[in-house]
Amino acid sequence: MTGLQAIDEPKPAAGRRTSRHVLGYATLVGVPGMLVLLALRMPAPAQPAGGGARVAHQSGVVPANVFTGLIFAIPVILFAGYAVARILRPMGQPKVVGDILVGVLLGPSFLGLLWPDAFHRLFPSELVAVVDVLAQLGLIFFMFLVGRDLEPGYLRDHGGAIALVSHAGFAIPFLVGMLLARPMYSTFGSDSTSFTTFALFLAVSMSITAVPVLARIIEAHGLRSTRLGSMVMASSVVGDVTAWCVLGFVIAAARSASPAGAVLTVVLTVAFVVFMVAVVRPILGREGWRSIPDAATLPVLLSAIMICALITEEIGIHAIFGAFLLGVITPRDSARIQRATESMSGTTTTLLLPLFFVVTGLRTSIGALDGLRTWLWCLAVTLIAIGAKWVSSMAAGRLAGYDWPQSMSMGALMSCRGLTELIVLNIALDLGVITPTVFTMLVIMALVSTMLTSPALTLIRRRSNRARVGPDGRLLGGVRGQGHG
């Protein structure tokens, strides 16, 4: 019988149709409903010994209080970050400064001290672990984006001066950190780590420049296309790549129980880097990548990031190195990859990365700096870190042919630490290399050095502009190294 013939058949009467509906509903809905109620009234079967604990462990369901706590805490974090960023914007501060401040304000140093009940309700102990996992996931994606932001053009276009500025801005603060580590270790060192590991971590933290934050400050001051801005970006990139390489070796040594284990970790790391550059990079640039459907680009990219992060984590360094390396070798001329990266960037920087700052704030306890002596150490560490980075970069800038105002600006920009510093510090704290007291000191140093960058740059430029104006109001000439490169 065709569909047309079925339509032409006579329809049953309205009464018969209604009775069929009632009978069908009672059979297909009412009977199962009554059986469900009957099943609920039956006595529960006996529970095997230990069964409840085993089922709860295997279910993988997040407890209700953790879930509701998470969806309550995240809007508080995001709103607080937006509010603080708006307050700091007229002061010329980048958003990362507001994010760091929010982390400290919501942590035990401020909210936990002024309103303990609210602090414990906002961040109960069972919720902190979940927030930390999300923060680490956001950190992995962010390090991929950092690797993508390393433009090879910067390194090609500015000659041999890049090596001078970048490595002087790394080597001198690194040496200062090694020297500073000796008295600090005798006062604040941990029994669980050796002096060498402590000193190397401290030296790396003194040498870091926050490339993502620095790029935003350079853009805000209109220096992106200038000779100064290009040189600072190129130098900071080379300096931070050097710092990440040194940090990888330090982590390998810190995680290995024996020298042979550290050597094996280094060998595996080098092999992984060679494989990524020699094998994976050509594959990403071939037609094989382009054969992936557009809708699958983002899932494949996210999976690749996490697989690379897993490999470096299993090797014995940190998961961020795998994500960072994949970002460096990923093609930049693909519109599909660019769209996928932009989609990932929005969620990472807006939702996941603020959680990393909150986790850092939860680990930062101003109360750990007890006594005048500890605060004096904190002040000394901050001044030495800023001074070493500033003076070394300024001196290198002068030797590279820049005038005094530009060299001083270079020192101010290169001393910006921001998020990159916090990543290093959290790794060191997780490994037990530094104590919570040293961690708090270095977080304060990172915050102060980042906050000083933009105001210092503005002050230098204003003084330089006033110095170029003669008594008659005309602009004086003879300033070396100005303008666009």
Image: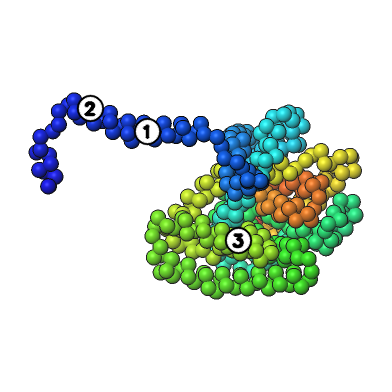
- Does residue 15 show up? yes
* Residue at image coords 41%, 31%: 34
> Considering the numbered disc 2 on the image, is that residue within a helix, a strand or a loop?
helix
Q: Earlier in the sequence, mark 1 or mark 2?
A: 2
Q: Earlier in the sequence, mark 3 or mark 1?
A: 1
Amino acid of disc 1: Val
Compare residues 454 and 57 and report the one nearer the observer.
57
State which quarter of the image contains the C terminus. bottom right
Residue designated by label 3:
310
Amino acid of disc 2: Thr
Compare residues 281 and 390 and report the one nearer the observer.
281
Compare residues 34 and 349 and report the one nearer the observer.
34
Label 1, residues with CA under 10 Å away: few <14, some 14-19, many ≥20? few
Residue designated by label 1:
31
Amino acid of disc 3: Leu
Label 2, residues with CA under 10 Å away: few <14, some 14-19, many ≥20? few
Residue designated by label 2:
18
* Residue at image coords 57%, 46%: 59
Residue 217, how many percent across, how many down?
61, 48
* Residue at image coords 89%, 40%: 372
